[in-house]
Image: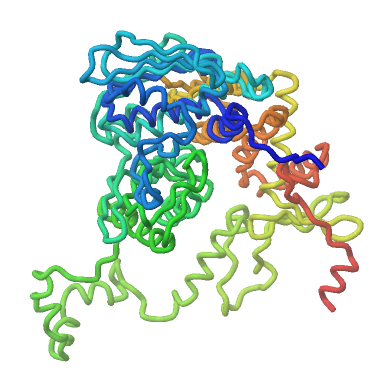
Amino acid sequence: MADVIQLLSEHIANQIAAGEVVQRPASAVKELMENAIDAGATDIQLVIKDAGKELIQVTDNGKGMSPTDARMSFERHATSKIRSIEDLFKIRTMGFRGEALASIAAVAQVEMKTRQAVTETGTRILIEGSDVKLQEPCAINPGTTIMVKNLFYNVPARRNFLKSGTTELRNILDEFTRIALAHPEIGFRFWNNGVEQHRLDPDNLKTRIMGLLGNNYEKNLVPVEQKTDLLNIYGFVGKPQASTRTRGMQYFFINGRFIRNAYLNHAVVQAYEGLIEKESFPFYVLFLEVDPARVDVNVHPTKQEVKFEDDRLMYTYLIAAIKHSLARYNIAPSLDFTLNPEIQQMDAVRLPFTQKQREETQKGYLFNTFSDSGQAHAIERNDSLKHWKELYEIANTPAAINTGTIPPLPGREEPAPQQTLLTGSMSEGKGKAAKMIVQGTWLATTVKSGMMLIHIRRAQERICYERLLREWNNEAAPSQRVLFPESYELAAADALLLQEAIPDLVRMGFDVSPLGKNTFAVQGVPPGLQAGEEKNVIDEVVELLRHESPDAVSRRTETILAGMAKRLSSNIQAIYQPEGQDALIDELFACTQPDLTPDGRKTFVMLRKDELDNLFG
Protein backbone atom coordinates (compact mmCIF):
# COMPACT_ATOMS: atom_id res chain seq x y z
CA MET A 1 0.00 0.00 0.00
CA ALA A 2 1.28 3.46 -0.93
CA ASP A 3 2.36 5.87 1.81
CA VAL A 4 -0.20 8.62 2.53
CA ILE A 5 1.58 10.89 5.04
CA GLN A 6 3.66 13.69 3.59
CA LEU A 7 5.04 17.04 4.64
CA LEU A 8 3.01 20.15 3.94
CA SER A 9 4.51 22.61 1.52
CA GLU A 10 6.02 25.75 3.03
CA HIS A 11 3.32 27.89 1.40
CA ILE A 12 0.43 25.87 2.90
CA ALA A 13 2.14 25.75 6.30
CA ASN A 14 2.46 29.53 6.25
CA GLN A 15 -1.23 29.95 5.38
CA ILE A 16 -2.20 27.65 8.25
CA ALA A 17 -0.01 29.69 10.60
CA ALA A 18 -1.61 32.84 9.24
CA GLY A 19 -4.98 31.49 10.36
CA GLU A 20 -3.67 31.45 13.94
CA VAL A 21 -1.67 34.68 13.95
CA VAL A 22 -3.43 36.91 11.39
CA GLN A 23 -7.14 36.51 11.96
CA ARG A 24 -8.12 40.02 10.77
CA PRO A 25 -6.44 43.33 9.80
CA ALA A 26 -6.08 44.27 13.47
CA SER A 27 -3.90 41.18 13.99
CA ALA A 28 -1.48 42.36 11.32
CA VAL A 29 -1.42 45.86 12.87
CA LYS A 30 -0.56 44.36 16.25
CA GLU A 31 2.31 42.22 14.91
CA LEU A 32 3.85 45.00 12.82
CA MET A 33 3.69 47.61 15.61
CA GLU A 34 5.19 45.17 18.13
CA ASN A 35 8.05 44.47 15.72
CA ALA A 36 8.69 48.23 15.51
CA ILE A 37 8.81 48.45 19.32
CA ASP A 38 11.26 45.54 19.51
CA ALA A 39 13.42 47.39 16.96
CA GLY A 40 13.87 50.23 19.46
CA ALA A 41 11.70 52.77 17.63
CA THR A 42 10.83 56.06 19.35
CA ASP A 43 8.35 57.15 16.66
CA ILE A 44 5.83 54.83 15.01
CA GLN A 45 3.34 55.80 12.30
CA LEU A 46 0.34 53.69 11.29
CA VAL A 47 -1.57 54.25 8.04
CA ILE A 48 -4.61 52.20 7.05
CA LYS A 49 -7.09 52.29 4.18
CA ASP A 50 -10.48 50.58 3.94
CA ALA A 51 -10.23 49.32 7.53
CA GLY A 52 -6.93 47.61 6.70
CA LYS A 53 -8.28 45.51 3.84
CA GLU A 54 -6.61 47.66 1.18
CA LEU A 55 -3.51 48.89 3.04
CA ILE A 56 -1.75 48.60 6.39
CA GLN A 57 1.48 50.57 6.60
CA VAL A 58 3.75 50.82 9.65
CA THR A 59 6.78 53.12 9.59
CA ASP A 60 9.32 53.29 12.42
CA ASN A 61 12.69 54.88 13.16
CA GLY A 62 14.14 51.74 14.73
CA LYS A 63 17.49 50.13 14.09
CA GLY A 64 16.50 48.61 10.73
CA MET A 65 17.85 45.41 9.16
CA SER A 66 20.69 44.32 6.93
CA PRO A 67 19.80 42.88 3.47
CA THR A 68 20.28 39.33 4.76
CA ASP A 69 18.19 39.89 7.89
CA ALA A 70 15.48 41.57 5.82
CA ARG A 71 15.15 38.46 3.68
CA MET A 72 15.40 36.05 6.63
CA SER A 73 12.67 37.90 8.56
CA PHE A 74 10.04 36.39 6.21
CA GLU A 75 11.07 32.80 6.94
CA ARG A 76 9.04 30.81 9.45
CA HIS A 77 10.53 30.57 12.92
CA ALA A 78 13.40 32.88 11.98
CA THR A 79 13.98 35.01 15.07
CA SER A 80 16.70 37.02 16.79
CA LYS A 81 15.13 36.49 20.24
CA ILE A 82 15.59 32.76 20.90
CA ARG A 83 18.86 30.83 20.93
CA SER A 84 18.16 28.07 23.49
CA ILE A 85 15.18 26.59 25.35
CA GLU A 86 16.16 28.60 28.44
CA ASP A 87 15.51 31.83 26.50
CA LEU A 88 11.80 30.97 26.37
CA PHE A 89 11.60 31.51 30.14
CA LYS A 90 13.08 35.00 30.17
CA ILE A 91 11.21 36.65 27.31
CA ARG A 92 10.84 40.41 27.64
CA THR A 93 10.30 41.33 23.97
CA MET A 94 6.89 41.54 22.29
CA GLY A 95 7.45 39.01 19.49
CA PHE A 96 9.81 36.06 19.62
CA ARG A 97 8.51 33.10 17.60
CA GLY A 98 9.30 34.39 14.11
CA GLU A 99 5.85 33.69 12.68
CA ALA A 100 4.34 37.16 12.16
CA LEU A 101 5.98 38.34 8.93
CA ALA A 102 5.93 34.88 7.37
CA SER A 103 2.21 34.52 8.15
CA ILE A 104 1.34 37.99 6.83
CA ALA A 105 3.36 37.46 3.64
CA ALA A 106 1.47 34.20 3.00
CA VAL A 107 -1.91 35.97 2.71
CA ALA A 108 -1.05 39.45 1.37
CA GLN A 109 1.13 41.47 -0.95
CA VAL A 110 3.95 42.83 1.23
CA GLU A 111 6.53 45.51 0.51
CA MET A 112 9.34 46.18 2.99
CA LYS A 113 11.91 48.99 2.98
CA THR A 114 14.54 48.94 5.71
CA ARG A 115 17.90 50.52 6.43
CA GLN A 116 20.41 50.49 9.26
CA ALA A 117 21.88 53.81 10.43
CA VAL A 118 25.43 52.65 9.62
CA THR A 119 24.66 52.02 5.92
CA GLU A 120 24.02 54.53 3.15
CA THR A 121 21.37 52.53 1.27
CA GLY A 122 18.52 50.35 2.38
CA THR A 123 16.82 47.21 1.10
CA ARG A 124 13.47 46.87 -0.68
CA ILE A 125 11.69 43.50 -0.83
CA LEU A 126 8.42 42.59 -2.60
CA ILE A 127 6.63 39.38 -1.59
CA GLU A 128 3.29 37.98 -2.80
CA GLY A 129 1.83 34.85 -1.22
CA SER A 130 5.22 33.84 0.27
CA ASP A 131 6.95 34.22 -3.14
CA VAL A 132 9.79 36.75 -3.22
CA LYS A 133 9.25 38.85 -6.34
CA LEU A 134 12.02 41.40 -5.89
CA GLN A 135 14.92 42.38 -3.64
CA GLU A 136 16.93 45.50 -4.46
CA PRO A 137 18.74 48.46 -2.86
CA CYS A 138 16.69 51.58 -2.16
CA ALA A 139 16.88 55.03 -0.57
CA ILE A 140 15.12 55.32 2.80
CA ASN A 141 15.64 56.95 6.18
CA PRO A 142 17.05 54.72 8.94
CA GLY A 143 14.32 52.40 10.20
CA THR A 144 11.73 50.17 8.56
CA THR A 145 8.52 50.66 6.55
CA ILE A 146 6.26 47.69 5.87
CA MET A 147 3.21 47.93 3.60
CA VAL A 148 0.64 45.12 3.65
CA LYS A 149 -1.68 45.40 0.64
CA ASN A 150 -4.88 43.49 -0.19
CA LEU A 151 -4.96 41.30 2.90
CA PHE A 152 -6.36 37.79 2.20
CA TYR A 153 -6.36 38.47 -1.55
CA ASN A 154 -5.44 34.80 -2.16
CA VAL A 155 -7.79 33.39 0.50
CA PRO A 156 -11.24 34.63 -0.61
CA ALA A 157 -13.09 32.62 2.03
CA ARG A 158 -11.15 34.32 4.82
CA ARG A 159 -11.71 37.76 3.28
CA ASN A 160 -15.46 37.12 3.00
CA PHE A 161 -15.60 36.34 6.72
CA LEU A 162 -14.27 39.77 7.67
CA LYS A 163 -16.86 41.96 9.37
CA SER A 164 -18.04 45.43 8.39
CA GLY A 165 -15.56 48.26 7.90
CA THR A 166 -16.68 49.92 11.15
CA THR A 167 -16.12 46.73 13.16
CA GLU A 168 -12.69 46.05 11.64
CA LEU A 169 -11.65 49.68 12.17
CA ARG A 170 -12.75 49.44 15.81
CA ASN A 171 -10.61 46.31 16.25
CA ILE A 172 -7.61 48.18 14.81
CA LEU A 173 -8.24 51.11 17.15
CA ASP A 174 -8.39 48.68 20.08
CA GLU A 175 -4.99 47.22 19.20
CA PHE A 176 -3.49 50.66 18.61
CA THR A 177 -4.82 51.88 21.99
CA ARG A 178 -3.37 48.92 23.89
CA ILE A 179 0.08 49.27 22.35
CA ALA A 180 0.15 53.06 22.76
CA LEU A 181 -0.94 52.76 26.42
CA ALA A 182 1.80 50.24 27.12
CA HIS A 183 4.51 52.55 25.72
CA PRO A 184 3.88 56.20 26.66
CA GLU A 185 7.60 56.88 26.05
CA ILE A 186 7.09 56.28 22.30
CA GLY A 187 5.41 58.75 19.92
CA PHE A 188 2.55 57.40 17.78
CA ARG A 189 0.59 58.73 14.82
CA PHE A 190 -2.41 57.08 13.21
CA TRP A 191 -4.09 57.89 9.87
CA ASN A 192 -7.31 56.31 8.61
CA ASN A 193 -8.21 56.90 4.96
CA GLY A 194 -6.02 60.01 4.89
CA VAL A 195 -7.52 61.51 8.10
CA GLU A 196 -5.32 61.76 11.17
CA GLN A 197 -6.99 59.97 14.10
CA HIS A 198 -4.26 60.25 16.75
CA ARG A 199 -1.08 62.25 17.27
CA LEU A 200 0.56 61.14 20.51
CA ASP A 201 3.84 62.67 21.63
CA PRO A 202 6.12 60.84 24.10
CA ASP A 203 4.86 61.68 27.58
CA ASN A 204 3.85 60.17 30.93
CA LEU A 205 1.16 57.53 31.40
CA LYS A 206 -1.52 59.93 32.67
CA THR A 207 -1.22 62.18 29.61
CA ARG A 208 -1.24 59.12 27.32
CA ILE A 209 -4.48 57.86 28.94
CA MET A 210 -6.19 61.20 28.36
CA GLY A 211 -4.86 61.40 24.78
CA LEU A 212 -6.29 57.98 23.92
CA LEU A 213 -9.40 57.65 26.08
CA GLY A 214 -10.54 61.24 26.61
CA ASN A 215 -9.84 64.26 28.81
CA ASN A 216 -12.82 63.40 31.05
CA TYR A 217 -10.53 60.96 32.91
CA GLU A 218 -8.21 63.74 34.07
CA LYS A 219 -9.98 64.30 37.42
CA ASN A 220 -10.94 60.67 37.93
CA LEU A 221 -7.55 58.92 37.95
CA VAL A 222 -6.14 57.46 41.16
CA PRO A 223 -2.45 56.41 40.99
CA VAL A 224 -1.52 52.89 42.12
CA GLU A 225 2.02 51.95 43.04
CA GLN A 226 3.09 48.94 45.07
CA LYS A 227 6.47 47.16 45.08
CA THR A 228 6.84 43.66 46.49
CA ASP A 229 9.32 40.82 46.19
CA LEU A 230 6.96 38.93 43.87
CA LEU A 231 5.76 41.71 41.59
CA ASN A 232 5.56 45.46 41.10
CA ILE A 233 2.16 47.06 40.46
CA TYR A 234 1.75 50.55 39.05
CA GLY A 235 -0.71 52.50 36.91
CA PHE A 236 -4.07 54.15 37.48
CA VAL A 237 -7.54 53.13 38.58
CA GLY A 238 -10.65 55.25 38.20
CA LYS A 239 -12.68 56.85 40.95
CA PRO A 240 -16.08 55.20 41.52
CA GLN A 241 -17.83 57.93 39.48
CA ALA A 242 -15.66 56.96 36.47
CA SER A 243 -17.13 53.43 36.40
CA THR A 244 -19.21 52.57 33.35
CA ARG A 245 -21.63 49.91 32.17
CA THR A 246 -19.08 48.80 29.57
CA ARG A 247 -16.20 46.35 29.89
CA GLY A 248 -13.93 48.07 27.38
CA MET A 249 -12.06 50.39 29.77
CA GLN A 250 -10.04 47.75 31.62
CA TYR A 251 -6.39 47.27 30.67
CA PHE A 252 -3.91 44.82 32.20
CA PHE A 253 -0.27 44.70 31.10
CA ILE A 254 2.24 42.05 32.17
CA ASN A 255 5.84 43.17 31.54
CA GLY A 256 4.53 45.68 28.98
CA ARG A 257 2.32 43.13 27.17
CA PHE A 258 -1.49 43.53 27.10
CA ILE A 259 -3.28 40.48 28.52
CA ARG A 260 -6.79 39.27 29.25
CA ASN A 261 -7.24 37.61 32.63
CA ALA A 262 -10.67 37.17 34.23
CA TYR A 263 -9.10 36.12 37.55
CA LEU A 264 -7.12 39.34 37.99
CA ASN A 265 -10.07 41.39 36.74
CA HIS A 266 -12.16 39.85 39.52
CA ALA A 267 -9.55 41.03 42.01
CA VAL A 268 -9.99 44.63 40.84
CA VAL A 269 -13.79 44.37 41.04
CA GLN A 270 -13.50 42.98 44.58
CA ALA A 271 -11.39 45.99 45.60
CA TYR A 272 -14.31 48.24 44.54
CA GLU A 273 -16.91 46.25 46.47
CA GLY A 274 -19.40 48.64 48.04
CA LEU A 275 -18.13 51.61 46.01
CA ILE A 276 -19.81 50.98 42.63
CA GLU A 277 -23.04 49.37 41.45
CA LYS A 278 -23.02 45.66 40.68
CA GLU A 279 -23.74 46.26 36.99
CA SER A 280 -20.86 48.73 36.67
CA PHE A 281 -17.22 48.09 35.82
CA PRO A 282 -14.29 50.08 37.22
CA PHE A 283 -11.80 51.81 34.94
CA TYR A 284 -8.15 50.78 35.25
CA VAL A 285 -4.84 50.79 33.41
CA LEU A 286 -2.56 48.60 35.49
CA PHE A 287 0.95 47.35 34.83
CA LEU A 288 2.33 44.27 36.56
CA GLU A 289 6.06 43.62 36.44
CA VAL A 290 7.03 40.09 37.35
CA ASP A 291 10.03 37.84 36.79
CA PRO A 292 9.53 36.34 33.27
CA ALA A 293 10.33 32.92 34.74
CA ARG A 294 7.13 33.18 36.83
CA VAL A 295 4.82 33.75 33.85
CA ASP A 296 4.28 31.78 30.63
CA VAL A 297 3.42 34.07 27.72
CA ASN A 298 3.56 31.31 25.11
CA VAL A 299 0.06 30.00 25.89
CA HIS A 300 -1.77 31.51 22.89
CA PRO A 301 -0.61 32.60 19.40
CA THR A 302 -1.70 36.23 20.07
CA LYS A 303 0.04 36.09 23.49
CA GLN A 304 -2.96 37.80 25.18
CA GLU A 305 -3.48 34.86 27.53
CA VAL A 306 -0.81 33.96 30.06
CA LYS A 307 -0.29 31.54 32.94
CA PHE A 308 1.18 32.53 36.29
CA GLU A 309 3.26 30.47 38.66
CA ASP A 310 1.23 31.67 41.67
CA ASP A 311 -1.89 33.55 40.57
CA ARG A 312 -3.54 33.45 44.02
CA LEU A 313 -0.73 35.48 45.55
CA MET A 314 -0.96 38.00 42.70
CA TYR A 315 -4.72 38.21 43.29
CA THR A 316 -4.15 39.10 46.95
CA TYR A 317 -1.45 41.67 46.20
CA LEU A 318 -3.61 43.34 43.55
CA ILE A 319 -6.61 43.77 45.88
CA ALA A 320 -4.39 45.15 48.64
CA ALA A 321 -2.65 47.64 46.30
CA ILE A 322 -5.90 49.04 44.90
CA LYS A 323 -7.63 49.28 48.28
CA HIS A 324 -4.58 51.06 49.69
CA SER A 325 -4.64 53.61 46.86
CA LEU A 326 -8.39 54.25 47.17
CA ALA A 327 -8.06 54.72 50.93
CA ARG A 328 -4.99 56.97 50.61
CA TYR A 329 -6.92 59.35 48.37
CA ASN A 330 -9.98 59.31 50.67
CA ILE A 331 -12.14 57.41 48.20
CA ALA A 332 -12.66 54.27 50.26
CA PRO A 333 -13.16 54.47 54.05
CA SER A 334 -10.11 53.60 56.07
CA LEU A 335 -10.55 52.67 59.75
CA ASP A 336 -7.94 54.03 62.14
CA PHE A 337 -8.44 53.26 65.82
CA THR A 338 -5.37 55.12 67.03
CA LEU A 339 -5.82 58.47 68.77
CA ASN A 340 -3.79 61.58 68.13
CA PRO A 341 -0.96 61.78 70.71
CA GLU A 342 -2.22 65.20 71.87
CA ILE A 343 -5.66 63.75 72.57
CA GLN A 344 -4.18 60.79 74.41
CA GLN A 345 -2.52 63.20 76.92
CA MET A 346 -5.79 64.91 77.88
CA ASP A 347 -7.12 64.28 81.40
CA ALA A 348 -10.52 63.22 80.02
CA VAL A 349 -8.85 60.25 78.30
CA ARG A 350 -6.02 59.54 80.74
CA LEU A 351 -7.80 59.81 84.16
CA PRO A 352 -10.82 57.78 85.42
CA PHE A 353 -14.24 59.40 86.09
CA THR A 354 -14.51 59.46 89.90
CA GLN A 355 -17.66 59.51 92.06
CA LYS A 356 -16.87 63.09 93.14
CA GLN A 357 -16.68 64.24 89.53
CA ARG A 358 -20.00 62.48 88.78
CA GLU A 359 -21.73 64.35 91.60
CA GLU A 360 -20.30 67.69 90.50
CA THR A 361 -21.41 67.05 86.94
CA GLN A 362 -24.99 66.31 88.01
CA LYS A 363 -25.18 69.75 89.67
CA GLY A 364 -24.05 71.51 86.48
CA TYR A 365 -26.14 73.56 84.06
CA LEU A 366 -25.88 71.18 81.08
CA PHE A 367 -26.98 68.12 83.02
CA ASN A 368 -30.04 69.93 84.36
CA THR A 369 -30.94 71.28 80.91
CA PHE A 370 -31.22 67.79 79.45
CA SER A 371 -32.75 66.08 82.48
CA ASP A 372 -35.30 68.54 83.93
CA SER A 373 -38.76 67.86 82.50
CA GLY A 374 -39.60 71.53 82.13
CA GLN A 375 -36.66 72.24 79.79
CA ALA A 376 -36.94 72.39 76.02
CA HIS A 377 -34.20 69.77 75.43
CA ALA A 378 -35.32 67.40 78.18
CA ILE A 379 -34.80 63.67 77.57
CA GLU A 380 -37.35 61.51 79.36
CA ARG A 381 -35.75 58.77 81.44
CA ASN A 382 -38.46 56.17 80.85
CA ASP A 383 -39.50 53.63 78.22
CA SER A 384 -41.24 56.05 75.85
CA LEU A 385 -38.57 55.41 73.16
CA LYS A 386 -38.26 51.71 73.82
CA HIS A 387 -40.14 50.84 70.63
CA TRP A 388 -38.49 53.43 68.39
CA LYS A 389 -37.65 50.87 65.74
CA GLU A 390 -41.24 49.67 65.40
CA LEU A 391 -42.40 53.30 65.29
CA TYR A 392 -39.94 54.07 62.48
CA GLU A 393 -40.96 51.05 60.41
CA ILE A 394 -44.70 51.69 60.82
CA ALA A 395 -44.40 55.40 60.08
CA ASN A 396 -42.67 54.62 56.80
CA THR A 397 -45.23 52.10 55.54
CA PRO A 398 -47.46 53.25 52.66
CA ALA A 399 -50.50 52.83 54.98
CA ALA A 400 -49.26 55.56 57.26
CA ILE A 401 -48.28 57.73 54.31
CA ASN A 402 -51.63 57.40 52.52
CA THR A 403 -54.00 57.62 55.49
CA GLY A 404 -52.00 60.06 57.57
CA THR A 405 -52.48 57.80 60.62
CA ILE A 406 -49.77 55.89 62.45
CA PRO A 407 -50.82 52.58 64.00
CA PRO A 408 -50.31 52.35 67.80
CA LEU A 409 -47.06 51.20 69.32
CA PRO A 410 -46.81 47.60 70.52
CA GLY A 411 -48.01 47.18 74.06
CA ARG A 412 -50.37 50.20 74.05
CA GLU A 413 -54.10 49.84 74.70
CA GLU A 414 -55.46 50.80 71.26
CA PRO A 415 -57.88 49.13 68.86
CA ALA A 416 -56.08 46.34 67.03
CA PRO A 417 -57.61 46.29 63.50
CA GLN A 418 -55.30 49.04 62.16
CA GLN A 419 -52.08 47.18 63.02
CA THR A 420 -50.91 45.89 59.62
CA LEU A 421 -47.95 46.19 57.27
CA LEU A 422 -50.21 45.78 54.24
CA THR A 423 -51.57 48.82 52.44
CA GLY A 424 -54.54 49.48 50.23
CA SER A 425 -58.21 48.75 50.74
CA MET A 426 -59.73 45.32 51.25
CA SER A 427 -63.26 46.69 50.83
CA GLU A 428 -63.44 48.77 47.69
CA GLY A 429 -66.54 49.26 45.59
CA LYS A 430 -68.69 46.30 44.61
CA GLY A 431 -67.44 44.33 41.65
CA LYS A 432 -63.80 45.28 42.22
CA ALA A 433 -61.24 42.77 43.43
CA ALA A 434 -59.66 43.58 46.78
CA LYS A 435 -56.04 44.70 46.46
CA MET A 436 -53.17 45.49 48.80
CA ILE A 437 -49.45 46.19 48.56
CA VAL A 438 -47.14 43.86 50.47
CA GLN A 439 -43.88 45.42 51.74
CA GLY A 440 -43.78 47.84 48.80
CA THR A 441 -42.75 45.10 46.34
CA TRP A 442 -45.81 43.01 45.50
CA LEU A 443 -49.38 43.85 44.66
CA ALA A 444 -51.76 41.21 46.03
CA THR A 445 -55.26 40.88 44.58
CA THR A 446 -57.99 38.28 44.81
CA VAL A 447 -59.20 36.34 41.79
CA LYS A 448 -61.90 33.69 41.36
CA SER A 449 -59.49 30.79 41.83
CA GLY A 450 -57.51 32.22 44.76
CA MET A 451 -54.93 35.00 45.02
CA MET A 452 -52.50 36.64 42.59
CA LEU A 453 -49.18 38.28 43.58
CA ILE A 454 -47.83 40.80 41.04
CA HIS A 455 -44.21 41.96 41.19
CA ILE A 456 -44.73 45.72 40.77
CA ARG A 457 -41.34 46.63 39.27
CA ARG A 458 -41.33 43.75 36.80
CA ALA A 459 -44.92 44.43 35.74
CA GLN A 460 -44.00 48.05 35.03
CA GLU A 461 -40.99 46.79 33.07
CA ARG A 462 -43.19 44.65 30.80
CA ILE A 463 -45.67 47.53 30.32
CA CYS A 464 -42.91 50.05 29.48
CA TYR A 465 -41.23 47.63 27.08
CA GLU A 466 -44.37 47.03 25.04
CA ARG A 467 -45.13 50.77 24.95
CA LEU A 468 -41.59 51.51 23.71
CA LEU A 469 -41.86 48.74 21.13
CA ARG A 470 -45.14 50.17 19.78
CA GLU A 471 -43.61 53.64 19.52
CA TRP A 472 -40.56 52.17 17.77
CA ASN A 473 -42.67 50.31 15.21
CA ASN A 474 -44.82 53.41 14.60
CA GLU A 475 -41.74 55.69 14.55
CA ALA A 476 -43.60 57.98 16.96
CA ALA A 477 -41.36 57.97 20.04
CA PRO A 478 -41.66 61.33 21.86
CA SER A 479 -38.56 63.21 23.00
CA GLN A 480 -38.23 65.53 25.98
CA ARG A 481 -35.69 68.35 25.76
CA VAL A 482 -33.21 68.45 28.64
CA LEU A 483 -32.73 71.73 30.47
CA PHE A 484 -28.93 71.44 30.54
CA PRO A 485 -27.55 69.37 27.60
CA GLU A 486 -24.76 66.98 28.52
CA SER A 487 -21.70 66.18 26.42
CA TYR A 488 -19.89 62.85 26.58
CA GLU A 489 -16.39 62.07 25.36
CA LEU A 490 -15.71 58.46 24.45
CA ALA A 491 -12.70 56.45 23.40
CA ALA A 492 -12.20 56.42 19.63
CA ALA A 493 -13.37 52.81 19.25
CA ASP A 494 -16.51 53.44 21.32
CA ALA A 495 -17.24 56.67 19.41
CA LEU A 496 -17.41 54.63 16.20
CA LEU A 497 -19.99 52.34 17.75
CA LEU A 498 -22.12 55.19 19.10
CA GLN A 499 -22.02 56.97 15.73
CA GLU A 500 -23.43 53.77 14.20
CA ALA A 501 -26.22 53.59 16.82
CA ILE A 502 -27.40 57.23 16.62
CA PRO A 503 -30.32 56.47 14.20
CA ASP A 504 -31.62 53.81 16.60
CA LEU A 505 -31.30 56.14 19.60
CA VAL A 506 -33.13 58.96 17.77
CA ARG A 507 -35.94 56.57 16.92
CA MET A 508 -36.27 55.78 20.64
CA GLY A 509 -36.66 59.41 21.66
CA PHE A 510 -33.03 60.50 22.20
CA ASP A 511 -31.58 63.60 20.60
CA VAL A 512 -27.89 62.70 20.19
CA SER A 513 -25.54 64.56 17.87
CA PRO A 514 -21.75 64.36 17.32
CA LEU A 515 -19.65 67.35 18.33
CA GLY A 516 -16.40 66.13 16.79
CA LYS A 517 -13.29 64.43 18.23
CA ASN A 518 -15.20 61.49 19.79
CA THR A 519 -17.59 63.81 21.69
CA PHE A 520 -21.40 63.69 21.59
CA ALA A 521 -24.15 65.95 22.94
CA VAL A 522 -27.42 64.67 24.41
CA GLN A 523 -30.14 67.33 24.10
CA GLY A 524 -33.26 65.19 24.39
CA VAL A 525 -34.32 61.98 26.16
CA PRO A 526 -37.45 59.78 26.21
CA PRO A 527 -40.09 61.10 28.67
CA GLY A 528 -39.81 59.57 32.13
CA LEU A 529 -36.07 58.88 31.97
CA GLN A 530 -34.47 60.21 35.14
CA ALA A 531 -31.70 62.80 34.91
CA GLY A 532 -28.29 61.18 34.57
CA GLU A 533 -29.68 57.88 33.27
CA GLU A 534 -28.97 58.83 29.65
CA LYS A 535 -25.25 58.16 30.23
CA ASN A 536 -26.04 54.64 31.49
CA VAL A 537 -28.22 53.97 28.45
CA ILE A 538 -25.44 55.13 26.10
CA ASP A 539 -22.93 52.92 27.96
CA GLU A 540 -25.23 49.92 27.60
CA VAL A 541 -25.76 50.54 23.89
CA VAL A 542 -21.98 50.74 23.32
CA GLU A 543 -21.45 47.57 25.36
CA LEU A 544 -24.11 45.75 23.36
CA LEU A 545 -22.57 46.76 20.03
CA ARG A 546 -19.06 45.89 21.21
CA HIS A 547 -19.97 42.26 21.83
CA GLU A 548 -22.58 41.92 19.11
CA SER A 549 -22.23 39.01 16.73
CA PRO A 550 -23.30 39.39 13.08
CA ASP A 551 -26.47 37.31 13.59
CA ALA A 552 -27.53 39.40 16.60
CA VAL A 553 -28.30 42.60 14.68
CA SER A 554 -32.00 41.74 14.56
CA ARG A 555 -32.12 41.50 18.37
CA ARG A 556 -30.28 44.78 18.95
CA THR A 557 -33.48 46.85 19.10
CA GLU A 558 -35.21 44.52 21.56
CA THR A 559 -32.17 44.44 23.83
CA ILE A 560 -31.85 48.24 23.90
CA LEU A 561 -35.59 48.69 24.48
CA ALA A 562 -35.50 46.12 27.31
CA GLY A 563 -32.72 48.09 29.01
CA MET A 564 -34.72 51.30 28.56
CA ALA A 565 -37.83 49.69 30.06
CA LYS A 566 -35.83 48.62 33.11
CA ARG A 567 -34.78 52.23 33.71
CA LEU A 568 -38.28 53.64 33.19
CA SER A 569 -39.96 51.13 35.55
CA SER A 570 -39.15 52.93 38.78
CA ASN A 571 -42.40 54.75 39.62
CA ILE A 572 -43.53 52.69 42.61
CA GLN A 573 -45.25 55.63 44.35
CA ALA A 574 -48.08 55.76 41.79
CA ILE A 575 -49.14 52.23 42.78
CA TYR A 576 -49.97 53.32 46.34
CA GLN A 577 -53.21 54.88 45.04
CA PRO A 578 -56.14 52.53 44.21
CA GLU A 579 -56.48 53.97 40.70
CA GLY A 580 -52.78 53.29 40.10
CA GLN A 581 -53.23 49.69 41.19
CA ASP A 582 -56.16 49.20 38.83
CA ALA A 583 -54.22 50.77 35.96
CA LEU A 584 -51.20 48.50 36.57
CA ILE A 585 -53.33 45.35 36.44
CA ASP A 586 -55.28 46.49 33.38
CA GLU A 587 -52.14 47.52 31.44
CA LEU A 588 -50.23 44.38 32.39
CA PHE A 589 -52.90 42.01 31.11
CA ALA A 590 -53.33 44.08 27.97
CA CYS A 591 -49.73 43.19 27.05
CA THR A 592 -49.01 40.48 24.48
CA GLN A 593 -46.94 38.51 27.03
CA PRO A 594 -47.95 39.67 30.53
CA ASP A 595 -46.40 36.81 32.51
CA LEU A 596 -42.70 37.56 31.78
CA THR A 597 -40.36 40.56 31.68
CA PRO A 598 -38.42 41.17 28.44
CA ASP A 599 -35.48 39.18 29.86
CA GLY A 600 -37.67 36.25 30.96
CA ARG A 601 -38.41 36.84 34.67
CA LYS A 602 -41.87 36.19 36.13
CA THR A 603 -44.15 39.19 36.63
CA PHE A 604 -46.79 37.45 38.75
CA VAL A 605 -47.64 34.16 40.45
CA MET A 606 -51.02 32.57 41.12
CA LEU A 607 -51.87 30.98 44.47
CA ARG A 608 -54.88 28.69 44.07
CA LYS A 609 -57.32 28.17 46.92
CA ASP A 610 -56.15 24.58 47.53
CA GLU A 611 -52.52 25.81 47.76
CA LEU A 612 -53.58 28.41 50.33
CA ASP A 613 -55.44 25.71 52.27
CA ASN A 614 -52.30 23.56 52.30
CA LEU A 615 -50.25 26.48 53.63
CA PHE A 616 -52.52 26.58 56.69
CA GLY A 617 -52.47 22.82 57.13
Location of residue 423 with respect to 571 vertically, above or below: below
Residue 315 vs 39, above or below: the answer is: below
Camera sees residue 516:
no
Q: Which residue is found at the position 41% from the left and 11% from the top?
A: 195
Residue at the front extreme?
A: 1
Front-lying residue, 127 or 364:
127
Q: Residue furthest bottom?
A: 355
Q: Is residue 10 left or right of residue 595?
A: left
Closer to the camera, 135 or 252? 135
Q: How is the image coloured?
A: rainbow
List x then y, in percent, for residue 351.
12, 84
Q: Is residue 6 left or right of residue 613?
A: left
Q: Residue at x 52, y 51 (%)?
A: 278
Q: Residue 36 versus residue 556: which sits nearer the camera?
A: 36
Q: Residue 321: x and y, percent?
A: 32, 56
Question: Closer to the camera, 501 or 394?
Answer: 501
Horizontal arrangement in the rendering, residue 401 relative to residue 140 (left or right): right
Q: Is residue 368 visible?
A: yes
